[in-house]
Amino acid sequence: MTGSGAPKTQVLWASGRDGYHTYRIPALLPAANGDLLAFCEGRRDSAQDWGQIDLLLKRSADGGRTWSAQQVVATEPGMTCGNPCPVLDRDTGVIWLPFCKNRADGGYPEIVAGRAPRTAWLTHSADHGHTWSAPVEITAQVKKNCWTGYATGPGHALQLASGRLIIPCDHYTGVRLDPSDPYGSHLIYSDDHGATWRLGAVLSLPGNESCALELDDGAVYLNCRTRKELSVRSYGLSRDGGLSFLEEGLHRELVEPRGGRGGCQGSLLKLPAPDGGPSLLLFANPATAGEARVRLAIQVSADEGRTWREARVLRSGPSAYADLALAQHGQIACLHEAGEQIYHERIDISRFGVEWLLGR
């Protein structure tokens, strides 16, 4: 990694423009041809988590400096299409995009009560994201009958060195949104290049929106949002390719905002060492124990996620969901929600170098 520059930030989506009231829930993925693909939810009529919501895409062919017009990847009248969690199959070049659907008039109370069931879907692209297949439903393959709420990612997913595709997900067990109802995170996986999917490891600790990566030793590391009674990240470690968790715990140094139901989505990224030494892990989230979603920071771990230290604050003001990716020329890209009064006024992309991040 050679990138040295301080952050350069530009707006990719702004509320009220190009046919949508609000843009939220970013995901970022480099395609096999080097293009950088930015995904998000386009919320047609309001900032709410339900309503007519489409999945959108913009692309950059120059490492994130310039961007295409937006493209609609998934839409259905009267439906919410959300929680993008893309992954590149390096063996085939195909991009898989899991996402969720439910009725547009069904908020989370209706989802968990069974009046607006949340289902899991998948579309894919064989041409670096230019065109996409008709979505297919995979709910029966990956969702337990006792789970009411369900979500993929959001943010990018991963492929193991073995070729296995893994999608971090979360679920909710309950019908009333009672604080005592169980909620958790889990993994789903495919061993046949996306043709079929299975349920993998299920975290026993509380977990919500989650992200994952493969460590240098081949273990799968899952990092999860929790609710306000914890307001720190939970984690799971799998040594059988994501089929079970051998170790679980809490990262008390990775704090989360307490507002609302608590916590916030975060993102992981592995930086391979140029000399073949241990990789660095990066984690991005609004790193505050206060009520508001502010202070988007990048944390660094040099010991495979055992301990974390704050490296840089990328944005001190309102900010929330984010996704990290490696861009061209040794740079890191962070696609993130931002605003001046509230965190979802726009989606920005920031590009910065490793030397800046580590203060070298």
Image (cartoon, grey):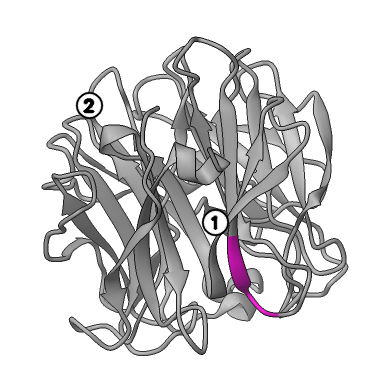
Against 54, residue 60 (above or below) is: above
Q: Are marks 2 and 1 in contact (CB under 8 Å)?
A: no
| 105, 229: nearer the viewer | 229
Residue beneath the point at 18% across and 45% down: 133
Instruction: Give left or right: position of 256 versus 93.
Output: right
Residue beneath the point at 73% across and 63% down: 256
Tag 1: amino acid:
Ala
Which percent across, then down, holds residue 149?
62, 62
Is 360 a magenta residue?
A: no
Is 294 a magenta residue?
A: yes
Quadrant location, the N terminus: top left
Quadrant hosting residue 32: top left
Which percent across, then down, holds residue 320?
55, 68
Residue beneath the point at 37% across and 70% down: 347
Query: Which SS class for mark 2?
Result: loop
Query: Which SS class for mark 1?
Result: strand
Q: Badge 2 local density, few (<14 within 10 Å), some, or many (20+)?
A: some
The boundaries of the magenta stretch are 292-296
Please name the residue that numbered disc 1 is placed on. 151
Task: Give the mark nearer the N terminus: 2 vs 1.
Answer: 2
Magenta part, dominant SS: strand
Camera sees residue 101: no
Q: Residue furthest front?
A: 360
Against 277, residue 306 (above or below) is: below
Instruction: Give left or right: position of 331 versus 197.
Output: left
| 327, 256: nearer the viewer | 327
Tag 2: amino acid:
Gly
Please name the residue that numbered disc 2 is placed on. 93
Which percent across, then down, holds residue 168?
56, 42
